[in-house]
Image: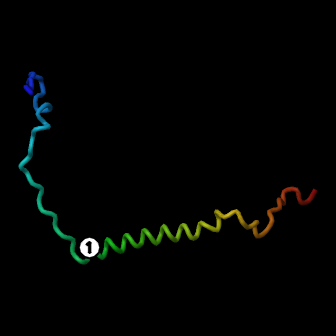
């Protein structure tokens, strides 16, 4: 099918679909053993912190048990 080319002010936008770059990104360097160990340590610390906060927060969120000591107001105690 014949494609009609109209002149537009920004022709590079219209031709962006056809553009192919010949620039290749530089090769990625592999992380050293120390960097891998550091990333693993940071990840394990984050996971342990999240698990610990959930474990410590679960008793406060449970509604199965009544409070350990009843709450009495002392504001009206002497009247």
Residue 30 x %, y %: 18, 70
- Left/right placement of residue 10 relative to residue 58 reads left
Q: Which of 77 and 69 is in front in this view?
A: 69
Please tell me how crowded label 1 is: few (under 14), some (14-19), or many (20+) other residues with Cα within 10 Å.
few
Residue 1 x %, y %: 9, 27
Residue 62 x %, y %: 66, 64
- Identified at 24% across, 77% down, the residue is 33
- Identified at 12% across, 24% down, the residue is 9
Residue 34 x %, y %: 26, 77
| Outermost residue toward the front in this view | 1
| Outermost residue toward the right in this view | 79
The residue identified by callout 1 is 35
Kindly state the secondary structure of the residue where label 1 is placed.
helix
- Identified at 81% across, 65% down, the residue is 70
Name the image quarter holding the C terminus: bottom right
Query: Please, is residue 16 above or below residue 10 in the view?
Result: below
């Amino acid at each position: 099918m014949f494609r009609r080319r109209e002149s537009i002010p920004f022709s590079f936008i219209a031709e962006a679909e056809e553009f192919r770059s010949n620039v290749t990104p530089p090769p990625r360097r592999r992380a050293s053993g120390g960097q891998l160990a550091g990333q693993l340590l940071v990840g394990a610390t984050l996971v342990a912190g999240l698990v610990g906060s959930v474990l410590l927060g679960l008793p406060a969120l449970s509604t199965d048990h009544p409070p350990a000591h009843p709450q009495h107001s002392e504001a009206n105690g002497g009247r």
